[in-house]
Amino acid sequence: MTKKKAFTLAEVLITLTIIGVVAALTIPAVVFSTEEKQSIAGLKKAMLTLDQAVDMARTEPEFQPNPKCYVGADGAASDTSQCADLFKYMKDIMQVQKYCKEDPVAGECVPEFAKTESCDGWNELKQGFMTADGMSFFPYSADDPTIIGVDINGLKAPNKWGYDIFSLQLTGSKTTMQMYEPGGCEYAMKGGKTGSQLLEESDDE
């Protein structure tokens, strides 16, 4: 009868150690990649939501052919003469679940997040609102949607710039349709990425 050779305890321990090291190296990368993909998906959804609201505004006589509210693209002049009216219109049609006219953080329309180092408008929010899908939106300046911040998962963690909070800018011109894209006063905390960086990397894949 042939005696089968079994693994020694030392060999088993060495194998488990190797598996542990490989897991420690690969699992964080997989998790980070998944989180980035979720951030990209949420960011694109927020941009689409805002763009659809602006598209709806174009059907109203007062905003035709395009709302006079945009940051000039490619050096073109900006126009903010209808920004207050556009912000009100967007807020009215975006399935807003909760609106905070003053102090949106205290009113739990916008999560509390760390102050930015260079964007004062994000540090002194005037108003904001939360939509039915759980996203939080807050303008950089009161009643002005040309630059608007979004937390793609609302009050849920991590509530950090470059992770789930991003800055979007309504860009266009007098003769072209405005569209939201990452921009304005972008900021990312350590380890995070701005919306521009995330979308650029997703385009390269």
Image: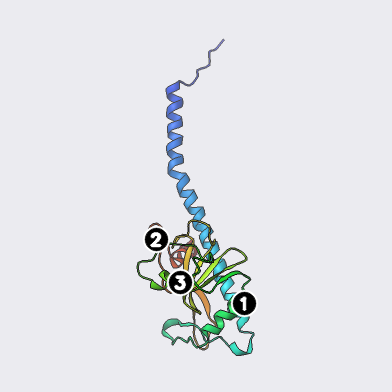
Determine if residue 2 is in view: yes
In primary-sequence order, the first of circles 2 and 3 is: 3
Q: Amino acid at mark 3?
A: Leu
How far separated are the C-alphas under marks 1 and 3? 20 Å
Q: Residue at x 56, y 84 (%)?
A: 85
Residue with the mark numbered 3: 125
- The three-letter amino acid code for the residue at tag 2 is Met
Q: Earlier in the sequence, mark 1 or mark 2?
A: 1
Q: Which residue is mark 2?
A: 189
Disc 2 residue crowd, few under 14, some 14–19, many 20+, Cα 10 Å? some
Question: Are the residues flagged by discs 2 and 3 in contact, CB closer than 8 Å?
Answer: no
| Residue at horizontal 48 percent and vertical 56 percent from the top | 158
Tag 1 near tag 2, CB within 8 Å: no
Work out whether mark 1 precedes mark 3 in sequence or the reverse, and give the earlier one: 1
Q: Which mark is residue 152?
A: none
Q: From the viewer's perspective, is the residue at label 1 or at label 3 nearer?
A: 3
178 versus 135 height, above or below: below
Measure how far apart labels 1 and 2 are at the Cα level. 32 Å
Q: On screen, 19 above or below 2?
A: below
Is residue 152 or residue 72 the one in the foreground? 152
Q: Which numbered mark, 1 or 2, is in the foreground of this view?
A: 1
In the rendered image, residue 115, in percent from the top left (x then y), is placed at 39, 65
